[in-house]
Image (cartoon, grey):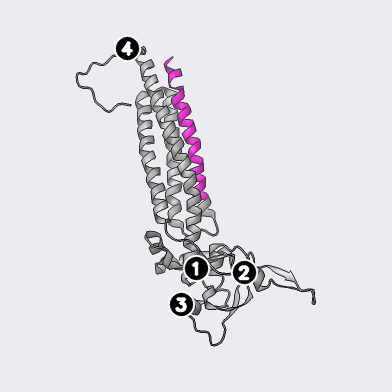
Amino acid sequence: MYRRATGPVGTTAFITFLLGIPILAGGIWLSSSATDCIRFLQLPLIILGVTLMAISLFGLSAACYGQLKLIRVFLFLLFVFLFAILFFIIFAYAVTDAGKGQVIVNRVFLEYHLDDYSGWLKDRVVDGNNWEKVSGCVQRSGECGVAMARYVRDLNSGLLVPEPADAFYQRNLSPIESGCCKPPTSCGYTYVNETVWNPVPGVPATDPDCTRWSNDQQVLCYQCDSCKAGVLATTRRHWRKVSVINIVVLVLLVILYFIGCIAYRHAKRAHYDETYGVNRMSKTAPSMFRF
């Protein structure tokens, strides 16, 4: 009877183990994403996933051996974990809250401005040492290379040529493609192909990024503020997707925690051979904190 009573606790622990998988997978996905070059937020997510799976295995072992004290420790650790993942979700939303793309007339793609972003994440990105690593990661990702190029066949020569400017302006570019692979539209540069733009003589540069732009494929706009904004926008997009998963996991964990507490109470009654409705309280001033 007693061993059967701890079965629901074991089931709860097993399901929490399964819930640790999407958290861990989200951290691994962010770490392996070629376009997510801000790496210092992924490690805490991976640690959370591994921690939840370890806590679940501990609870599963405690339920299998019918150890009430260990089951109580499992529930306590799960309670602490709920606050940890809640804090992480709030933190992720807080550091990725500001900033969004700007609509440009006669353009489908959005453009991104560093002034639209603020806070801890921006400070980490624009820091000189960090940006050297991040910009190198963006360059190695190949976002501005072959993956961005599109060609059409010239009807007269039959040769493949870069798509015309009107077609390029109708493309839905990613934040990194928009911010790092081309100059800002305000520069007024003439389109040659996706990553080659020529300045118009006599037109003054109103944006500092205009002078940072280079047709050198190893330079492009990797040092532009628009590129930094594009990286922040990419991070924001990825982290919002992962946060949705974490919120769902948190809700399910809260439900499982209460189910586990109820299962623990039943297992405790079975252990002491208590019958329902019988009050075995012996303390004159019992503690108000009970599982």
Whether residue 242 is situated above or below residue 35 in the rendered picture? above
Cα distance in 3D space between marks 4 and 1: 69 Å
Cα distance in 3D space between marks 4 and 2: 76 Å
Magenta stretch: give its range.
1-28
Side of 257 where 234 appears, left or right: right
The disc placed on residue 169 is 2
Cα distance in 3D space between marks 2 and 3: 22 Å
Point out the tag, 4 or 2, that comes first from the N-terminus: 2
The secondary structure type at the circle numbered 2 is helix
Residue that numbered label 4 is attached to: 278
What is the quadrant of residue 185 in the picture?
bottom right
Judged by its main secondary structure, the magenta piece is helix
Residue that numbered label 3 is attached to: 208
Residue that numbered label 1 is attached to: 227
The secondary structure type at the circle numbered 4 is loop
Disc 1 crowd, CA 10 A, few/some/many (<14, 14-19, 20+): many
Identified by mark 4, the residue type is Val
Cα distance in 3D space between marks 2 and 1: 18 Å
Identified by mark 3, the residue type is Pro
User: Residue lying furthest left in this view?
Assistant: 284
Disc 4 crowd, CA 10 A, few/some/many (<14, 14-19, 20+): few
Point out the tag, 2 or 3, that comes first from the N-terminus: 2
Identified by mark 2, the residue type is Tyr
Whether residue 243 is situated above or below residue 142 in the rendered picture? above
Identified by mark 1, the residue type is Cys
